[in-house]
Amino acid sequence: MNRLIIIGNGFDLAHGIESSFKDFIIEYLRDSINNFFQNGDYSDILLEIKFIPPYNHFSKQPELIKADKVLELVEQYKNHSSFRLRIKSKLLERAYSKIKDYNWVDLEVEFFNLLIETKKKFIDKKKIEEINNVNSQLEYLKRKLIVYLEKQESYFSNVFDKNLLTDCFCEPIKTSELITVKLKKNQLPENLYFLNFNYTNTFESYIDLCRERIPTNYNYIHGTVSGVNGNPIFGFGDELDKRYLEFEDEQNNELFKHIKSFEYLQSKNFYLLTSFLESNDFQVHIYGHSCGVSDRTMLNQIFEHENCKSIKIFYHKINEGKNDFVDKTYEISRHFKDKTMLRKKLVPLCFCREMPQPQNEYELNNVE
């Protein structure tokens, strides 16, 4: 039996890379405001900051703002006495509101919801124009995101203890974790296959260590910031959503421009994943992936595949006595049409564990 290891954004966050959509949006807003402070004007297709006449400059150059002040200042600057901050993009406005209200945002889901609203609100040429506008806003944010992640990736230090997570990746498949197939005893996976949903290469720090124990391969299913392992794929991936089916009745190919399934066809990564799924029985490990609906098409294919025999969550410990295991099961359930299959495959909490947090050498050498 093989093991499919799903790597999500929480994995990068645990390694000190601020790669969430929230981190990215706040950095974009911070850079835009600081640019205005330095140049006295800022405008792009999403945002505009400009002086209100008769004001046309700062009497004293403001200090550059820090990330933790951004949300507070955006609200102030929307109605400032001498200048105005105006969010021109509906997509950015939705993302900003979610971060402000919930401290979290799935930008791909917000894009899809906006696309649905736009399709329903407008007709004929105006509909085409507005859908193109929504696509352009996402494309602009995608370019900004790639630059942001390149910078974040450059900060990553490979100097930390890798043994705890390597032990998890290479642990035996236990008889207690399987209902749909019977093993005579616990056994090591025949192969490991890392399915990386991030655009960064953080998980590669573990590849050589895993290969010393078990044959290991990997797949950048959404591409990488560099494009070496495929161009970044960014959009929405839930073809099971009833609202998505309405797209197929529309004579407008622009609706499909950022649907992930069509972007998967432009590289070999999805094809290689399918080959792995078909090759042998496998167990799924989940590390730091939200299992949200923006990847529902692919996760449904994995989880309901006849060769998938169990799904084990390495949950995030929020604090003493609290973790995200239950919330994760809610999300995973959305990827199953057959709920009986869900209950057979999902490994219960008592057999799961927290995802170990990597410690750098400084932390290790300064433990009291």
Image (cartoon, grey):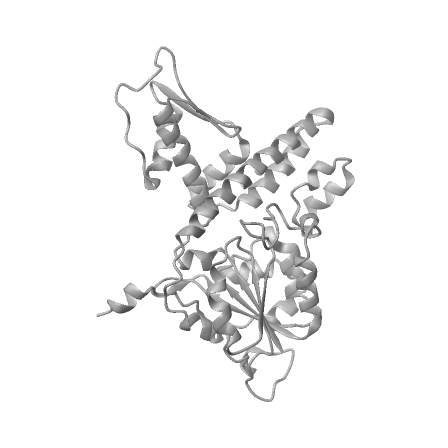
Locate the N terminus by quadrant. Answer: bottom right
In this view of the protein, which residue sits in the foreground, 57 or 150? 150
Q: Position of residue 343 (x, y in %)?
A: 60, 70
Residue 197 vertical placement versus 250 (above, below)? below
Residue 213 visible here: yes
Q: Position of residue 345 (x, y in %)?
A: 60, 71
Residue 62 vertical placement versus 23 (above, below)? above
Horizontally, is 365 left or right of 345 in the view? left
Residue 104 visible here: no
Residue found 63% across the figure and 65% down from its top: 303
Horizontally, is 138 left or right of 314 in the view? right
Locate the C terminus by quadrant. Answer: bottom left
Residue found 43% across the figure and 46% down from its top: 151
Horizontally, is 121 left or right of 69 in the view? right
In this view of the protein, which residue sits in the foreground, 210 or 136? 210
The residue most toward the bottom is 184
Residue found 67% across the figure and 27% down from its top: 129
Quadrant location of residue 214? Answer: bottom right
